Image: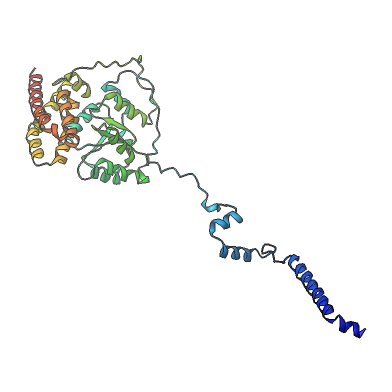
Amino acid sequence: MLELFNLYQNEIIAALAIILVIVLYIIIKKKQKKPTVIDDPYDTDDTDDIMEDITQQAPPQTIQEIIPKEETTPKETIAQPSPKPPQTAISKAIKKEVPPHGKIHKEDFKEFANKRILLAEDNIINQKVILGLLADSDMNIVVANDGQEVLDILQNDTNFMLILMDAHMPRIDGFEATRQIRANPAYDHIAVIALSGDTASDDIKKMYDSGMEGHLEKPLKMDLLYDVLYTYSDNNTTPIEEDVKEDISVQKEAAVLDPEDGLEVCGNDKAFYAEILNEFVQDYNDSSLKLQQYINNKNFDDADKLLLDVVGITANVGAKKLHNTAQALKTALKENPAHIKDLFLEYHKDLKDVFAAIREYVQK
């Protein structure tokens, strides 16, 4: 045996080496086929650790794709309907619907006998027109010459059915006076009605925004004044019983002086109308000179105030042509300066013409 081993020693060793290599090869191959075990990072209940780990490994958009977050809106951030803007304060005066009626005459205002109104008007002629119109009504009318006087009167006397409030007055204008009135609950029972020659939509909006709840345009029309007084009166008597007739207005060419219109405003009182005409001549005979000075000095605010008075008064007396020219010049001061000179010259001519027509009328 030993002799055989010695004889084949080299072969045996070689065979053993081959066997050993084969065994080692098999062992290595088996190890390569065995799967490597890696812990699954998502196989855990520690959600916070997962989120932290992912955040460190991926950009934000990848996170949102892998783990989308449920979008929720906190209750406090849910959009709510915008609250309605506060309404402009108005009076709490009781309103009545005006039933249909025929043409109103001066004597019809007796229906409001003993009712009290506060007239806020700084122009003496306009004061006289309204006072003359209501002279036989037995109404109690208190006059204030500006907004400050209105507030002073109300401090001691609040027993008024309504206030006829001129929009443009010295010291405190009608807008500011109305705002202060509406801010005081003690005056809640008093309605404020605007008196103004301004008819543009922006002007009317400004009146309502200040707390005025109605608008009477100058020149004052008896029918509209009657309707306002009836609306805010607690007098339950039925208005004049007449057949209701449709009022058909015929458009006339602007007249230098239309006594019919002027007389209607003055309640068909010829003596009163003549008095108003004379006062107009006396108070405004130098208005052309004043306007010229205002315009040359570029004092357009004072020019506008003067023209506003003229617009209202000429409408009351029936001076239609001058009324239209004054209104056009007033507009040009703000919107069309190129026409100021021509309109001023036309104003000067129309003023002379209406004075001549007034002289002819009162001398009849």
Position of residue 99 measured from the top left corner of the image (x, y, whole percent)? 39, 22
Residue nearer the viewer, 24 or 87: 24
173 with respect to 329 (left or right): right
Position of residue 354 measured from the top left corner of the image (x, y, whole percent)? 10, 24
From the image, which quarter does the N terminus lie in? bottom right
223 with respect to 348 (left or right): right
Q: Is residue 273 above or below residue 30?
A: above
99 with respect to 34 (left or right): left
Residue nearer the viewer, 136 or 187: 187
Q: How many marks?
A: 0
Q: For the point 56% across and 61% down, which residue is it?
A: 58
249 with respect to 236 (left or right): left
Position of residue 20 measured from the top left corner of the image (x, y, whole percent)? 80, 75
**Quarter assignment of residue 217:** top left
**Quarter assignment of residue 87:** top left
Of all residues shown, which one is farthest toward the right? 1
Residue nearer the viewer, 67 or 78: 67
From the image, which quarter does the C terminus lie in? top left
Q: For the point 29% across and 46% down, which residue is it?
A: 155
* Residue 52 shows in the view: yes
Q: In this view, does 9 lie above or below 194?
A: below
Q: Is residue 237 above or below residue 290?
A: above
Of all residues shown, which one is farthest toward the bottom? 2
Q: For the point 36% across and 17% down, which residue is it?
A: 241
How are the colours assigned in the image?
Answer: rainbow
* Residue 67 shows in the view: no
